[in-house]
Image (spheres, coloured by chain):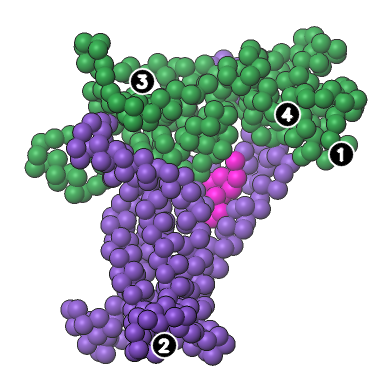
Amino acid sequence: MSLKGKKQSFRILRGDSENSSMEDFEIELDEGMVVLDCVHRIQHEQQADLAVRWNCKAGKCGSCSAEINGKPKLMCMTRMNDVVAETPENIPIEIRPMKSFPLIKDLVTDVSWNYEIAQKIKPINGPDEKNWEFNQMEADRVQHFRECIECFLCSNTCHVLRDHDLFDNFAGPRNLVRLAQFEMHPLDKEDRIPEIKKDFGVEYCNITRCCTEVCPAGINITDDAIIPLKERVVDRYYDPIKMIWRKITGRK
Amino acid sequence: MGEGFKLPVLNGLGKTNRIDNWWSQPLIMGTGLTITLIYTFWRLFIYDLEISYHLNGSTVVSPLFSPNILEWELFSLNEWAKTAPNWINAAILIIWIPFGFRGTCYYMRRVYYRSFFASPAACWVDEPQINKSLGYKGEKMVFIINNLHRYFLYAAIIILLIKWWDVTHTMHFNDGFGISIGTLVMGIEAFLLSMYVTSCHALRHLAGGVLDRWVSGVSKLRGKMFKKISIINRSHGFWFWASLIFVFLGDLWVLAVNKGYLSDIAIFVI
């Protein structure tokens, strides 16, 4: 279906921390547009002060996260063909900022909470000599997590934060990925399990997998990061045989 | 949290800005699980007859009642079965293993939290007010039992081995060794269960995920096992549903043969 020349209506949240409302816009589409192109066209032709955060337009910087028709996505990676196809005729395409984070203006939110949590995570504590060596198989497991672009769509999606506001108890999927990356690092010597359980609240996750569904970097957050962390917490706190074994051997 | 006003999440069960049919998946999965629960209850507590049949010397047991431990000579279970209360059957005695294994499964948890607890019913869909007023605790309180998944896994592996043993019982005919439709039914069921068990997240962890280093010898082997299990672990949900559905299809097959609606045949005997 060619979109060239099609008149398309949008409804975009406008406003700041004082007051906000949904405003309607209409633009003419071109072939091959993504949602961010449309927002830019509205900005260019109609509303020069429409605030939108963006950078690479290639799904690598993680800046343009928003909720399109109620689904959190990167605007630069969401093709208009798909959005138009899912939106009924005569109904505008709705674009809102991420809901879980404080609104700064229009489509821009303040995601600094994620960085504040990240600062609480102890850095890698490997051997003092920096001639670190490990094999490819060991590297693959933790390298996978470095594909995260920090768009925070996962933390925006997680119902523990979104619906229950447990920002003080739960680190959110992105930071659990960071913890998994350090905890499973082949040379890291830090014992992170107690804080993963108590401070970062891995047990608040009930594995409904929305973070994995939404990740634009394709990281299998639930299977590769959160569940392995949960299993390590089980090893330490809930497995009676392992607990007895540790008592006997004196090992952690 | 940073400065500024946070947009309110739409409050109330099912409130969302999504425009697609987000409710269809939790509804279908919840209905499927409810049907399996009701059917299992009926079969275990109300109609526990016709759980197996014989074909020319071979024995085909319904997957729901396999292993039929009440026919075992081990620990004189067959003797005890004669004096046991009428309502006792093999499935009642072992159902806690598959029930516990599936109930604490990391995939199943996704399904039941969504379908039965609406926590959340679907992504970006608000939860019912009661979930919020009760105070969300995650996998604590009663859900702490989910941490025993690995123990149910150990028991499930034993059951699985016996199920394969039961498949061999369908292959011993009076006039030789062969395969019947019953063999295929039980064999496919055992295969699907094997895939479901071996794609388990807890097994993946215990096999190699627990280690930070896979350097040499046993640890390297465990690393390779971790990688292999990781491949099938990606489709754990598929194996969950395929194996679950086949347990009940297998039971319906055994019922249908017993009732005379369908008949089993030996496909070949050597």
- Image coordinates of residue B236 in percent, x first then y, are 46, 50
Q: Nearer the viewer, residue A204 or A219?
A: A219
Q: Nearer the viewer, residue A127 or A239?
A: A127
- Disc 2 marks which residue? B55
How many other residues sit within 10 Å of disc 1, few (<14), some (14-19) or many (≥20)?
Answer: few
**Chain for disc number 2:** B
Q: Secondary structure at mark 2?
A: strand
- Disc 1 marks which residue? A89
- Which of pointers 1 and 2 indicates the residue nearer the eye? 2
Task: Answer with left or right where residue A11 lies relative to residue B140.
Answer: right
Q: Are marks 1 and 4 on the same chain?
A: yes
> Which of the marked residues, 1 or 4, is nearer the chain's N terminus?
4
> Which of the marked residues, 1 or 3, is nearer the chain's N terminus?
1
Label for residue A79? Answer: 4
- Image coordinates of residue B180 in percent, x first then y, are 45, 79
> How many angstroms separate mark 1 from mark 4 (CA)?
17 Å
Residue range (magenta): B113-123
Q: Which chain is green?
A: A
